[in-house]
Image: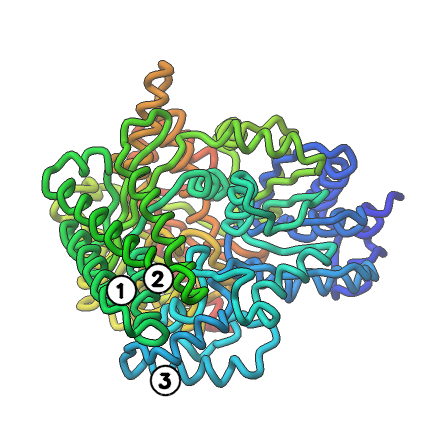
Amino acid sequence: MAQVEQAFSASGALAQIIDGYNPRQAQIDMALEVEQAIAQQSSLVVEAGTGTGKTFAYLIPALLSDKKVIVSTGTKNLQEQLFHKDLPLIKKALKYHGQVALLKGRANYLCLERLDQFSRSRGQLDAQGLQDLVKVKTWSTSTKSGDIGELVDVAEDSQIFPLVTSTVDNCLAKDCPFIEECHLVNARQKAIDADVIVVNHHLFFADMALKDTGFGELIPKAEVVVFDEAHQIPDIASEYFGDAFSTRQIHELASDVIAQYKTALTDVKQLGKAAEKLDKTAQEFRLLFPYDGERGNWREKINISQFETQYQALKDDLDFLYQVLKLCVGRTQEIDHCFERAVSLLQKHDLMANTDSFGISFWYETTRRHVVLHQTPLSVADKFSAYVNESNAGWVFTSATLAVDGHFDHFKKQLGLTAKALFLDSPFDYLAQSQLLVPRYLPSANHPNRAKKLADLATQLIAASGGACFILFTSYRMMNMVAELLEEQISNELLVQGQMSKRKILEQFISSKDAVLLATASFWEGVDVRGDKLTCVIIDKLPFASPDDPLLQARSEDVKRQQGDPFAQIQMPQAVIALKQGVGRLIRDVHDKGVLVICDDRIVNRPYGEVFVKSLPNMRRTRDLNSAIAFLSTINEQQSNK
């Protein structure tokens, strides 16, 4: 028996260290295909249903190959799980002695120079920010990795983190006085020396884009590349092959210039004035957009006179700061770097002003504080496929959600892949473990009574399940409307996305005995709640991207020009994959039971609804609310009697 097959056998390496281990044919099939792709330096696309054990199925052949391996994940959570839980177990089982390393993006590491600069300039912080700064300073003297994930008692969205971590723009690189102790440099060095490196997709493509412009190589060249949660790759790759210009970059430049003025260059008053004026103009530019976050078409926006005027004012003030910085070049390393950043931002400003280019989408998105202008290529297939073909590596792309109606064409076309495809069903007995309810008589998506009817429906299902319920929405507006109504109708603890960090809200959901969680897109995937803690998932409607989404509009126009059908080729495949992710929250192991509720009639009364249904697990289907309530009540009673 070959080495890989032996590892998964009833008496093999895994059986010897995992209690109650049983071989799974789907897992073995995947592992053997991965082994072959590595040996032949070819590409493999695998949809492995929840419970297949895909992590072990790619890690074991990768480690046994004795080649340099990169594993890239879609989320930091999975990255941490792979490195701290799965890899140590497999290393022990296989008696593997190679080096493994975890490498995160730059923003995850403490920057000693930024911490020193901020402490000396005495930048302004509120009371919470000052407490967090004290915690960061205390931790900075003892940490070996500099990974800010170690700071569990500081909120993920703390105002201190952007001030003590670096960006590509503000990193001093070789000129940094702390280069010898730099946590990021040390993490990269460990990765270069390692045999197996665990990264995330954002980091992988940031590096790929840097290599493309000839600036260097962040992730070492590998002989095996595995993408887990691979359904995310096309969008992330597009982001990194494009460009962006943001008011955040301007704000950070202005802050760093002001810090220099207050410490090393107090004699150059124009420096402080120019930076403050630029920062104020950037804030005024943000105020032209609505308060709530939105996405839109930048080509259209820049043709409106007030936007055009304010965008030009940004250029004028940026140019003025550039002129003042030019006079200070050579005085400090930090100010030289600020000068280079001003040059780069002027170039990006011009790039976003020239909206006539073809094959590119120009779009913007806003947060509460900032505006980001994007220039995104409509396809990355040519670039990515060339990268894969020239690499002389084995490539594995896997996820629980890659196929649409049993085919991988959509995914492979987006990345220009010529790859063998493998479809592995989940080992779960969905017919026995779950029900799919599509309720009758719900008002249409834009009906004024829609939120009330959703809340009424949810109230009955929550009562039957005793809480343990996710309600997933495609919009914040509907989520907040339903949350307000439920507040009055139920006594269960209500957890609404945005009230606290994702990690904290999940911890609270799991520790509560009857909580109900309301969330949007970020909770549709990468969330693992097992057992009786989650027995009901309600999805408000089919997750089609908003027709106003500028990137979707641009891609749709491109498909139309080629006489294609944008709905069939782009919108529907994306929605199917997103829905499959949401559905995947419900049944996480062989003992889980629950009800999935899709509150969208289109799944049963539109021709394309069949494509959605065929892409979902084979659940027992019903349109009768009482049937679902009875099933949930039975589950709830069984749990109570345990």
Judge from the rendering whether residue 212 lies leftward or rightward of residue 525; answer left or right: right
Q: Is residue 535 visible?
A: no
Choose the circle earlier in sequence order: 3 or 1.
Answer: 3
Give the Cα separation between the discs numbered 2 and 3: 35 Å
- Residue identifier under label 2: 328
Q: How many marks?
A: 3
Question: Could you say which is closer to the camera, residue 521 or residue 512?
Answer: 521
Q: Amino acid at mark 3?
A: Gln
Using the image, tell me which numbered label, if any, was put on residue 131: 3
| Position of residue 115 measured from the top left corner of the image (x, y, whole percent) | 44, 75
Choose the circle earlier in sequence order: 2 or 3.
Answer: 3
| Position of residue 547 measured from the top left corner of the image (x, y, whole percent) | 26, 35
Q: Determine whether label 3 and label 1 are within 8 Å by CB.
A: no
Applied colour scheme: rainbow
Question: Could you say which is closer to the camera, residue 229 or residue 507?
Answer: 229
Q: Residues within 10 Å of mark 2 (few under 14, many from 20)?
A: some
Please say if 617 is above or below 135. Answer: above
Judge from the rendering whether residue 189 lies leftward or rightward of residue 586; answer left or right: right
Q: Residues within 10 Å of mark 3 (few under 14, many from 20)?
A: few
Q: Is residue 361 visible?
A: yes
In front: mark 2 or mark 3?
Answer: 2
Judge from the rendering whether residue 625 lies leftward or rightward of residue 621; answer left or right: left
| Position of residue 113 measured from the top left corner of the image (x, y, whole percent) | 48, 71
Identity of the residue drawn at 75% across and 64% down: 18
| Position of residue 238 measured from the top left corner of the image (x, y, whole percent) | 44, 38
- Residue identifier under label 1: 271
Q: Amino acid at mark 2?
A: Cys
